[in-house]
Image (cartoon, coloured by chain):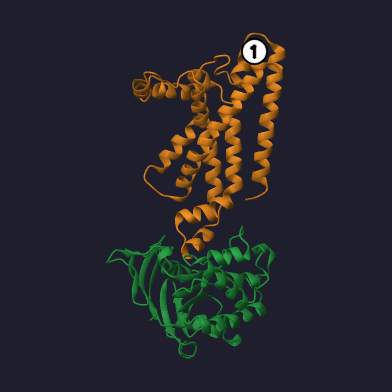
Amino acid sequence: MDSSLLFSLRLSLQVAAVATLFVVIAGLSAAFLLARKNFPGKELLDMVLTLPLVLPPTVIGYYLIVLFGRNGLLGAYLYAWTGWSVMFTWYAAVLASFVVALPLMVKTARAAIESVDENLINASYTLGHSEWWTAFKVILPLAGKGIIAGAILSFARAMGEFGATLMLAGNLPGKTNTMPLAIYSAAASGDRSEANTMVLLFTLISGLFLYMANRLTKRGI
Amino acid sequence: MGLSINIKKRVNGFKLDAQWRINDELAVLFGYSGAGKSMTLRMIAGLMKPDEGEILLNGKPLFNRAAAIDLPPQARSFGYVFQDLALFPHMTVRGNILYGAHGLSKNERELRCRDMMERFTIAGMEKKFPHEISGGQKQRVALARALIRRPDALLLDEPFSALDAPLRSEMRNFLKEIRREFPIPVVLVTHDLAEAVALADRLIIMAHGRVVQTGTASEVLNSPSCPEVELLVNTKVVWV
């Protein structure tokens, strides 16, 4: 394997790992909120968090540019304060991956949390334990497999992100060209052997992740 | 000292309107399924909110609509045993019991846990998980977990309904035994008349969301207050 391929592979793993970290934190919080609390706007929040699952990546990319671009709603302030913009950096790839992977985490974790027997939660409350303590000691352990499965799916999805990443981070060799982008370049320039290697490698890695996620969810929660 | 309730609740067309008070005695909430027994218990424990009324435990209001008092279940000192026992499947027997010893020092927790396991004849099962022990042992663990904190009252929601007949009568005797060591108000929900008569210091008969009669077992059996009660107690009276 040549060094540019290795760079793409390493960048993809790095982007997916960082994105998944944030996905787990944000997704788990959202899943808890949606599964256990009733509040106005709950359905709206659920819809907004699920939208990236069905929207074309170009639409997500466009939204992210509008928000975080150098002249974007938030990006403009960031640029004015720091002279730095997230655009065309590997952080942009993280941002894109985060948004597209988040719904998978929220959906899977929410289902896992909702599957925990309500009586066990009530038992914990009647034994004097707070909602937080109950979440950590009863709900999280019992929903653990589903939550880990959600994290693995999110990682796989984050690693495979292409469209929004292309719009936000660009396809800069040695800087932002994650594996899906490198595969696109290789295929576009007719480099079949390079494309074949990467496609096979990518399929293997993604297959492995799906296998792990399936095993976790099948073995019961 | 004791527990008194006067509560109203409407859910999906069902209307519950219950008022009674008990002292440090074992009261049995008796009636057909759907009479509102379990719902009453859940409202006492704070797992469900009444629409109106008041719940007092040892003179202290746990719920009072007029005064906007509604203590969360964590702040009400009840031991609660659920119908399915609700043992934590991911914790050992010891873990389950210690989980009930919230707010005690580490020493005290250990001491009481050992004492409870001894008393409830489940010593030696510390490291076993709920799915590895028998139905009767699970009952004892659930009771130990509910009582280790020495709550002010005990609420039992059809705790023995999943057991076969010999074990059920063994558990009834066991409950009577531990009553001597924990002289607190106990509310037990059941639709089994034999169980109700065997255990109750006081019977509270419920039908269609209302309390239709209260009294000792013999009072209720000998002079049912209405046809509903008569039907309830006569169907199985031969077994008493």
Q: Quadrant of the C terminus of chain B?
A: bottom right
**Which amino acid is tagged 1?**
Ala
In this rendering, is residue B5 above or below A74?
below
Is the residue B113 above or below the residue A166 in the image? below
Image: A49 above or below B51: above
Along the line of sight, which residue is nearer the eye, A218 or A1? A1
Q: What is the letter of the orange chain?
A: A
In the visual, does B128 lie left or right of B236?
A: right
> In which quadrant will I find the N terminus of chain B?
bottom left
Give the class, few, some or many, for how many residues have Cα within 10 Å of label 1's Cα (few <14, many ≥20). some
In the image shown, does A89 or A205 lie closer to the viewer?
A: A89
Q: Residue placed at 54% from the left, 60% from the top?
A: A120
The residue shown at (58%, 14%) is A173
Tell me residue A204's x, y (percent): 70, 28
**In the orientation shown, which residue stands out farthest toward the front?**
B107
Residue A57 placement (x, y as % from top left): 51, 24
Q: Residue at x 64, y 81 (%)?
A: B170
For disc 1, the chain is A
Q: Is residue B80 visible?
A: yes
Residue B191, x across and y down, in percent: 54, 75
Is any atom of residue B35 visible in this view? no
Identify the residue under disc 1: A186
Q: Secondary structure at mark 1?
A: helix
Up-down: is A199 above or below A206? Answer: above
The colour one sees for chain B in the rendered image is: green
- Residue A183, percent across and down? 63, 17
Looking at this view, is A118 or A22 the one in front?
A22
